[in-house]
Image (tube, grey):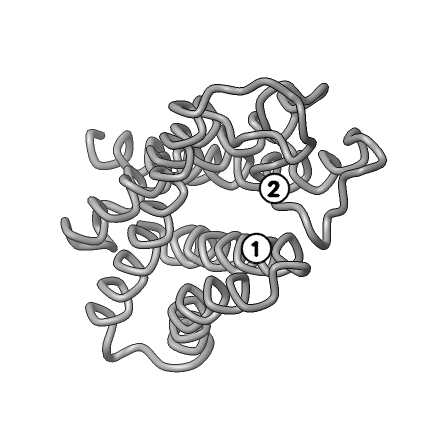
Amino acid sequence: MNLRKAAFSAKYLTGASAAGLTASLLVLLVAPAFMPDSYSWVTHTTSESAAQGVKFAWIARLGFALFGIAVLLLVFSARRTWNPLARIAHALFGMLLVAAAVFSHRPWEAGVPYSQTEDLLHSVAATGMGFAFATGVVIVMVTRSNTSGYPRILDALALVASVAIPLAMMNLPEHTGLFQRGMFLIAYVWYGMEIVRLLRSGD
């Protein structure tokens, strides 16, 4: 009976993670539509759509928070699949996402007052997210070394993107928003496929 309860609990957590991940993706997709005309989803990042002093910034902040919570739920439900170091790295990613929702980026429009301390904390959280995600992906990839097919390909893609996309953002700043959204999309797909694997395996 306890095993059945544990299995039900894991399924429930995995399902809740899937719901949170989907809701987060939808929220972040619609957030740019509520931004002022000066906002460009190609140039400006998702963090700027959640910036201080911006009307409807709460929408993107909600997207960050939902994403972070979804990852934290996945960490709990994947306790039999991911080793402790992987869970720590992905839990850190989830917590830093929530921190990015709490501490907002500076506004892109000149003259809008903002807190430099809050902007700094957001930058620290965003930078830490990149390292935590890459680390977590590497650990998961190594520990499932006998797995072939799309999981290994997706692991490699996520790892390459976590290095290449930040470099592209630095060298092509006019496309920063587009590149960052590409990175987010890869993260959504990676976590989404982990959820699918858990549901199929029954863990």
In this rendering, position of residue 33 left or right of residue 107:
right
Packing grade of label 1 (10 A; few <14, some 14-19, many >=20) is many
* Residue carrying label 2: 46
The numbered mark at residue 79 is none
- Front residue of 54/134: it is 54
- Give the mark, 2 or 1, whose residue is nearer the N terminus: 2
Packing grade of label 2 (10 A; few <14, some 14-19, many >=20) is many
Q: Going 65% across and 35% down the picture, which residue do you hit?
A: 108
Quarter where residue 131 is shown: bottom left
In this rendering, position of residue 84 left or right of residue 77:
left
Q: Secondary structure at mark 2?
A: loop
Give x and y (percent) for residue 115.
Answer: 47, 19
* In this view, 168 is above or below 76: below
Q: What amino acid type is highlighted by mark number 2?
A: Thr
**Contact (CB < 8 A) between labels 2 and 1?**
yes
Quarter where residue 61 is shown: top right
* In this view, 109 is above or below 203: above
Give x and y (percent) for residue 125.
Answer: 36, 37
Give x and y (percent) for residue 97.
Answer: 42, 36
Q: What amino acid type is highlighted by mark number 1?
A: Gln
Q: Secondary structure at mark 1?
A: helix
Q: Going 61% across and 59% down the picture, which residue do you hit?
A: 173
Q: CA distance from mark 2 to mark 1?
A: 8 Å
* In this view, 198 is above or below 17: below
Quarter where residue 26 is shown: top right
* Residue carrying label 1: 180
In the rendered image, the quadrant that contains the N terminus is top left
Give x and y (percent) for residue 112.
Answer: 65, 21
Q: Going 46% across and 71% down the picture, which residue do you hit?
A: 164
**Which residue reaches farthest right?**
37
Q: Going 39% across and 34% down the picture, which residue do you hit?
A: 13
In this rendering, position of residue 122 left or right of residue 138:
right
